Amino acid sequence: MDPIHINYNEINTHLTLSDCVKELIILSYKIYNEIIKSNIPTTLVCGGQSPAYFCLAMINFDIYDPKLCDIIILPHSKGGQKSTDQNEENKQYTQRLNEKNIIFKKNVIILDGVHSGTGINALQSALLYYDHTLNIHKYAINTDEYISKIPVTKTYIVKSEPLFSDTFPRIVKSFHPRKFYDSSKFITNFIDISTNPIANMIIDLAKSYNRINLDDTLWIRLNHVVSEDIKENKKEFNEQQNKLSIQNKNRRIKFKPINKFNSNNDKVYQCPHCLSVSGTLAVEMPYDTSLFSHNIYCKYKYSIPYE
């Protein structure tokens, strides 16, 4: 496909399409290059839609070497819901892997967006059920380092990740546990690439990435359209980032709350900044910051109340 302007005006974001694709190309190259430079034969598992466009870029780089690091697409859609019977899910998923004769190198990296960790942990469990000798690492692609609620091996910060995960056209079929019994639903290749201009943009740029300056390409020039909406969204985004930066700097520091009493005459705290009022548990266990609900951008959101 020749370079074209791709219309995505309906998306409420502070990023142009070129911003998104550039970030994806640069980070995808960084991740894959780090893996092959380790010189450890590795299988990179594309754990669904979230990492799909990143993996699409990787297999089109001129450094792609499946002998050192192959990429396998394994849809495994949990939607944040924990399993009611993980063992049965693993058994069914293993049947699907056996049917396709999926072979892993002993060192495995699962790449995915990681929030609650339910999805990536379930996929890890299924792979270990399939082959308990695998050495599995979890790589997160998230918008900030604090999103993941579980420990991961590495976190890569990608501001455009939600767009590639949830907004742009799917290039990996979802595969929910309720369909694990159905072999026909287990699609381990990219879908609808030829009719997807964003995918074609990524493929073209990835193929020549080592020989070009991205900003000089027609793809990037045509799709770096800074609309008035984007200008406003960027201003709001920068303000939010500034608040979050202050919030993160204040993690685990102590602040003096306002003492109050609820209707039962139990002691509670009020935040002097956002004026949110805690429950009684925040008084009893002040070091557990999850017990004190602040405004989303409050500078004391992750700080410790201390009298």
Image (cartoon, helix red, strand yellow):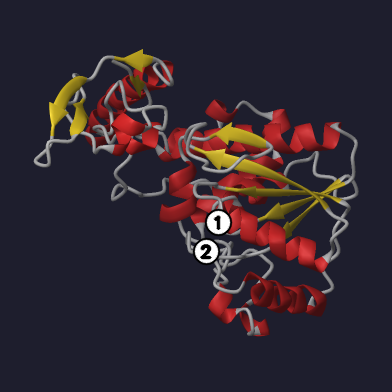
Q: Are marks 1 and 2 in contact (CB under 8 Å)?
A: yes
Amino acid at dot 2:
Lys
Classify 76 as above or below 28: below
Measuring from the top left, give residue 54's x and y in whole percent: 62, 46
Residue found 28% across the figure and 22% down from its top: 239
Q: In this view, which residue lies farthest toward the front?
A: 265
Quadrant housing the C terminus? top left
Classify 47 as above or below 93: above
**What residue did someone put label 2 on?**
82
**What residue did someone put label 1 on?**
118
Q: Quadrant of residue 270?
A: top left
Q: Is residue 169 left or right of residue 236?
A: right
Measuring from the top left, give residue 76's x and y in whole percent: 61, 65
Classify 64 as above or below 190: above
Q: Is residue 101 left or right of residue 252?
A: right
Along the viewing direction, whichever of 209 and 231 lies nearer the viewer: 231
Q: Which mark is residue 304?
A: none
Along the viewing direction, whichever of 296 and 85 lies nearer the viewer: 85
Kind of element beneath mark 2: loop
Along the viewing direction, whichever of 188 and 292 lies nearer the viewer: 292
Kind of element beneath mark 1: helix
Residue found 81% across the figure and 76% down from its top: 98
Measuring from the top left, give residue 274's x and y in whole percent: 19, 25
